[in-house]
Image (cartoon, rainbow, N blue to C red):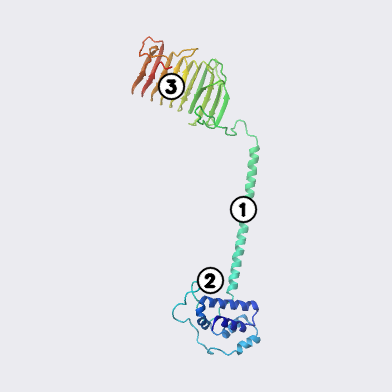
């Protein structure tokens, strides 16, 4: 018996069922036939059994009342033996491959155990998926509620931050990072920590005392000081002492502290610099009667210095002075350069015969003489002490 003949007879025998249940049963058996393939329709029909027997079992399971259709089922002559032996899956090769395997189970034709297939399977699957969908909806709802709660907290936090930002900040605190100033070479000095104008009385001494960091002295029209990258919790001050003297103190222990002091020519009678731990000193183009500079560890350099007395010392580092020159107000008379663990390089505008020099350099001395003369009775004194080399040039214009 072919598929459609089998299903047509089964549909007629199930006339007593409600239309929807009858259609469910027919769909189930039609899928059974489709899974087996067109070429196995007669074999599948034999495995399922007589349509009358199948219909009777379905009606019994559904508890259908005896109707004309049921009576026809009872009266219908059996096409098989009245007491068929229990059917078992015939032995032999597996069913042939499905024409459209993607539409059917990959395990082949299900075996028939002699019992009427349970047509309530589709309903159970429908219920199962409804439960799954309901659970997902509940979880998504809970998640959305949590996200809404977090959003509210975030909004509250933002509001409080904005309110705090609008409150006045004490003047002693750094409220913002100002643009970083740059030196003559365009290099950045860092975040501005302290800035102040300086008095320039034209006499007295300016004493600069730092724990560590780098010092740059510049020449300009207005006296001022700027401190960058310093530890703001440490003392930074500028105070007057006695005899027109002033003291600038920077106790920052941050190694990248940068202090820049601008001084007009002859702003003070003398300038004294002390860096007690480590840091470089750039004397720039100072025009001061007397300059004293000391650093425990760091390089000391300069541009063109115009000074009468110069005393420069570094515990560990080099001394590199581009030029030491006279000016209209005074001429250089005393120079002391000491690099205890470093080398010395300096150029002088005065010729060699004007210097009474004592030069000590463990790794060698190099002197370039403008007039190739030396004098023991020269009006100027020069002392050079270096662990490394001493490279000195005279008569440099």
Q: How far separated are the C-alphas under marks 3 and 1?
A: 67 Å
Return the disc, 3 or 2, that comes first in the chain's sequence.
2
Crowdedness of circle 2 by 10 Å Cα count: few (<14), some, many (20+)?
few
* SS assignment at label 1: helix
Which residue corresponds to mark 2?
Answer: 103
- Nearer to us of marks 3 and 2 is 2
Which residue corresponds to mark 1?
Answer: 147
Residue 130 in sight: yes
Crowdedness of circle 1 by 10 Å Cα count: few (<14), some, many (20+)?
few
- Residue, far left: 363
Up the image or down, 204 lies above or below 115; here it is above
For the point 47% across and 25% down, which residue is it?
281
Residue 134 location, x and y as percent? 62, 64
**Quarter of the N terminus within the rendering:** bottom right
* SS assignment at label 3: strand
Which residue corresponds to mark 3?
Answer: 321
Return the disc, 3 or 1, that comes first in the chain's sequence.
1
Up the image or down, 198 lies above or below 161; here it is above
């Amino acid at each position: 018996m072919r598929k459609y003949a089998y299903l047509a007879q089964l549909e007629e025998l199930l006339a007593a069922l409600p239309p929807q249940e009858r259609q469910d049963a027919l769909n189930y058996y039609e899928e059974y036939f489709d899974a087996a393939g067109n070429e196995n329709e007669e074999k599948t029909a034999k495995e399922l059994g007589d349509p009358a027997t199948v219909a009777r079992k379905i009606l019994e399971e559904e508890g259908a009342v005896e109707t004309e259709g049921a009576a026809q089922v009872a009266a219908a002559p059996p096409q098989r033996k009245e007491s068929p032996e229990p059917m078992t899956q015939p032995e032999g090769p597996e069913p042939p491959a499905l024409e459209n395997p993607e539409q059917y189970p990959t395990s082949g034709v299900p075996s028939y155990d002699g019992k009427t297939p349970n047509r309530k399977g589709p309903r159970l699957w429908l219920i199962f998926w409804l439960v799954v969908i309901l659970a997902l909806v509940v979880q998504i709802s809970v998640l959305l509620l949590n996200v809404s709660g977090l959003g509210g907290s975030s909004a509250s936090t933002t509001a409080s931050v904005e309110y705090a930002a609008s409150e006045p900040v004490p003047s002693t605190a750094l409220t913002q990072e100002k643009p970083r100033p740059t030196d003559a070479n365009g290099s950045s000095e860092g975040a501005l920590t302290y800035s102040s104008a300086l008095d320039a009385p034209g006499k007295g001494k300016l004493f600069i005392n730092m724990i560590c960091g780098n010092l740059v002295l510049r020449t300009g029209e207005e006296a001022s000081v700027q401190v960058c990258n310093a530890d703001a919790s440490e003392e930074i001050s500028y105070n007057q002492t006695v005899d027109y003297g002033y003291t600038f103190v920077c106790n920052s222990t941050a190694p990248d502290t940068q202090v820049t002091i601008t001084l007009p020519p002859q702003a003070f009678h003398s300038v004294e610099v002390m860096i007690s731990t480590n840091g470089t000193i750039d004397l720039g183009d100072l025009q001061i009667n007397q300059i004293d500079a000391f650093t425990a560890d760091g390089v000391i350099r300069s541009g063109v210095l115009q000074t009468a007395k110069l005393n420069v010392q570094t515990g560990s580092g080099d001394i590199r002075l581009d030029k030491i020159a006279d000016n209209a107000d005074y001429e250089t008379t005393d120079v002391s350069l000491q690099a205890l663990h470093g080398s010395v390089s300096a150029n002088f505008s005065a010729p060699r015969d004007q210097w009474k020099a004592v030069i000590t350099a463990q790794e060698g001395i190099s002197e370039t003489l403008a007039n190739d003369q030396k004098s023991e009775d020269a009006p100027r004194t020069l002392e050079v002490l270096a662990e490394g080399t001493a490279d000195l040039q005279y008569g440099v214009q």
